[in-house]
Amino acid sequence: MSDTMKQNLLVLDVDYIVEGNKAITRLFCKDEKGKTALVMDSNFEPYFYVMPTKGTLEKLKKKIEGLDTKNLEAKILRVETVEKNWMNEETKLIKVTIDNPRRIPDVRNAIKDWKEVEETYEYNITYYRRYMIDKQIKPMGWVEVEGELKESNGYQVDRIIEASSVKATDMEKDIDFKVLAFDTEFVEEDGKSKLIMLSLVFDGKYKRVLTSCDWKDKPNYVEVVRDEKEIIQRFMDIVKEKDPDFIVGYNSDGFDIPKIKDRATVYKMPLKLGRDNTPVHVVRRGRISSAKTKGRVHIDLFNFIDHILSASMRSEVLTLDEVAQELLGIGKRKMKYKEMVEIWSKKEQLGRLAEYSLWDSELTLKLAEHILPQIFSISRLTGLLPFDASRNTYSQLIEAFLMRRAFTDNVLIPNKPKTEEIERRRMAPVYKGAIVIEPKKGIHSDILVFDFRSLPPWEKTYVKDPAGFIKVVEIGNFVERFQKNGKVIRESRSLITELNGWKALTFDEEKNKVCWKPIKAVIKHEIKCPYLLKITTEQGKQITITPNHSIFSLDNDGKLTLVRGDELRIGTNLILLKRIPVRENLKKLDVMELLSSLSQKITSDLLIILPRKKLPHKKRLKTWMNILNELRGASSLEELRERLKYHRATIRKNLVLLRRKGLIDYRNYSGIKLLQEGENYLKFVLNLRPTRKRGFLQARFNDIKNINVPEKLKKDLFLKQSRGRWKRILPCVLELNRNTCWSFGIYVAEGWMTKHSRIYFSTSDELIKNRLLRTLSYFEPSEYKDGKGFEISISNKPFALLLIKLFGHNSHHKHLNPLLLQLQKNLKLKLIEGMIDGDGSIGETKFKYTSISERLIDDLNLLLLSLSVGRTSFISSGKIKNLYVYQSLGKIKIRKGVRESHPLYLIPRNYVEDHITSTLKNAHRGSRIDIQKVAENLVINGCFPEKLKFFFGNCGLEQIKKIERIKYNGWVYDISVKDTEKFFAGNGLILVHNSLYPTIIVSHNISPETLNCEHSECKEKNKVPESKWHFCTRKEGFIPKHIRDLIETRKKIKEKMKEVRKDSVEWKRLDNEQYALKILANASYGFMGYIAAKWYCRECASATATFGRAYITKVIEMAKASGFKILYADTDSCMVTIEKRGRK
């Protein structure tokens, strides 16, 4: 007998099912007492909109009503005329309501090409999201449910309600959620991945480590089961028993759950962790695959940190250890994968392994306590389920927020852009970004400076690490890194730490060349002056120094000279770098060495493959192994004979062969030494095992990666995944050619990969596609085609890991491995050519490369400097970084003559006036002279003045255009270089803030539908500076209205926060809410410039930046006019000195 009831419930998760062609929305909830409930609502009907062409509304309506839907397996319930706001105008549309949401695409496809149809809208909104939007239900918010109680029917909930009514409510009440954190440990056994331990922590009290191995004196939290299958079964049982609302892991989408699911599949047991008794299933969220458990929310903390928090974190590598150290101040227990394997194989110290596993789960739970409230606040604000909110990017969050607000405003939601439209948006020219001091293009390069006390922490320099790799580093991070772990000596206001093995890039004046010299110490100083000097050259290159320190220039005799910062003037020449010296001899990659630095977990399923024929025949190999093994204790022929019982001639013969191989050394068969090469050879061969494929041997990569395999043997080795195909094995020594390096460049520009190591290359150019297919044919690539262009994919984990080591794994973290600087010149050129083909453009006077990775732009600039390409500049536009090159490079050709126009390659007239002929003098009336023609003239006349020697080296000159003061009261940094105090620094890319921009969007009513209205007064009142655009002032735009709401709501919350204690639960709740509001408000500007956005408007994004520059400029002018001194201005702030009280 069913009972009618009415109750308030908090929504945790929502999805839908279809029964009898009828959609039923399922809301998994909790009540105020913590009891679980499932609400089944079948009262909501799916729909979409159709926009008719002009004058065809009624005709189209009747035509849709008469549509035969028998073959579509759908029933049209209603066809009605409605009005929606579209581009600030009330527009009549046709609303088509059907019975089954899964058939909306079919019905839409059946009518979209009719001549009476202008466009269709809101057809691709997921049904359960449509349900929540229309009912304004907030995930992690409360609803009022009325309906009848039903039997549980297999669901793991306290009750089921068949709803007659579900309404959103404003009720605010915090309840406790049950959270379970887990982690897994896998090892390789017999070439297969095996689950050896699974740890769980539930609400901080219940702790378990499940394992199949027993031992004495094990901790109470260890539970021993029979085998791997029972570990998985017990995991599911505990989840069912404890009934958590949230299951949290760290990289559980990418590792733990997929691995458990794979092992469960082997045992033919479905992995059931949800509340509806269905197995875990994988769904796509952007480019990541996510494991979804219905009714019980699975949160992968790594994805939220990677997408949202990482931008404000110091950690570059988002491992659990690094993230926990930064956010919690505690890290992981230390244990290498090799130790784990050894402990498990020997069944010793299992307690230590259990403790290590359990601590990972405890650490994950502690992170969850810190991060989940932020996810919940974002979820309530955007209307996204916690499952989605924890995995979405900034743009997806703001889009979800605007979609909910569009419904309340009766605004038609724009469609997601098609691939052709995205490509068109991508090709649009970049617009100017924010202002720093005054509007500028943001060009930066490298400047020779003296004494790092002149540099703040953000300035960059080039260093060479002990392994010989060149890196671009921020000086503050570089110094702090060594002072954190090294011995610090305090002298007055300075902290000094000695340093060995590192080198700095400096200039040898006698030899007139750039060179590397050892760094003796790194130093940190307390600044004595309240401001710094920001120096900008005529081409926009920058360096920031303290006033009392010096920078290098060139005197009239061509000699280096020091000029104090406060003595620098407009027009002073600074010395800049044109070329970096590097060895260019690399033509093969040691893949084993590159991958050996990866964690044991990542490489656990890799195998080393060796063709059997590359080793001696079995009998001889056995003899060699015995001799090498005995040489650990024997040192003469007679000792070997005594131990091995071999014939003297046999030993002599094999000793000769072993010496030829470079494995041993001896004289007159006495004093026989086992060389390190021999020791490594022995260790490697002992790890080899037969394979299923005849004629090959294999070893686990993790077992031999720390063995220095002899080079002669390494060239015969291959890498493959344990389950990978034999045709796709990767050579351990990869010979590089032009095509390979070109394909690497394409990957850097337009490549990405999934967490399952599937590599994708995308291009819209068929010639590039065909060339890629030929180059990658060894890996048997797959080809896909869509409206955007072509996608080529290959599945090869060793190759994927190699690409990650060389170039990173996604667009935000792309870089160029320092090893690539050593490539042969022709291979470097091909790498750059591939990058330009993939994500660059070539003009008449320059070519350009674009990326959102600042590190990649820095690394590319370094690569260009190694090729003697100093004619470069940087232009930043928001997060987009552009590198311009004013020089032909390989097959990348630009207009002849540009080289001579760049200041680095020109000589100031006063340096050469006394040494050139009158003819040459008359040919150049300007202030600068062509360096090439000067050189030709001097060679012809047999003279080479000493004062011109500098200009034919690796440096050039550029004049100061502007000197500004900026306020600063932090530390400044120095490095001490052996035999000199000169080194290069000052790469200085500008980072952009957007906090001013939400206010500009609101105050200037910036929105796609308000752009360039027909009202004459708007053209005058709200014109965008430096453009022909204006925005309407008569009616508030859709986006400004809701950004204003975000800003005002955040202000109110910030005021409330002042009234409560910081250590209270209420303060933490308010802080999470204001953080979510801040994220969305600041994302609004970038969202309108995001090429895949539904509310994309390049003009809006550009106008916002333009207004920002205009406001800062106006503030500076007003301050100067009032007698104030400008200390600093950057994007959304301006600092001035206040000399007299009472000024406003």
Image (spheres, rainbow, N blue to C red):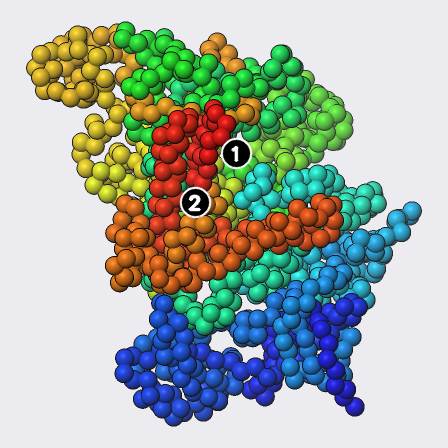
- The residue lying at 23 percent from left, 18 percent from top is 907
Q: Say whether residue 253 is left or right of residue 176.
A: left
x and y percentages locating residue 484 in the rendered image: 65, 26
Q: Say whether residue 233 is left or right of residue 464.
A: right
- In this rendering, is residue 963 above or below 1060? above
Which mark identifies residue 879? 2
Which residue type does callout 1 highlight? Lys
Q: Secondary structure at mark 2?
A: loop
x and y percentages locating residue 70 in the rendered image: 45, 91
Q: Which residue is mark 1?
A: 712
Q: Quarter-wise, where is residue 25 in the image?
A: bottom right
Nearest-to-viewer mark from 1 and 2:
2
- In this rendering, is residue 908 above or below 1037? above
Q: Quarter-wise, where is residue 1036 in the image?
A: bottom left
Mark 1, residues whose alpha carbon is within 10 Å: few (<14), some, or many (≥20)?
few
Which residue type does callout 2 highlight? Lys
x and y percentages locating residue 502 in the rendered image: 54, 21
- The residue lying at 39 percent from left, 26 percent from top is 1123
Mark 2, residues whose alpha carbon is within 10 Å: few (<14), some, or many (≥20)?
some
- In this rendering, is residue 337 above or below 1015? above
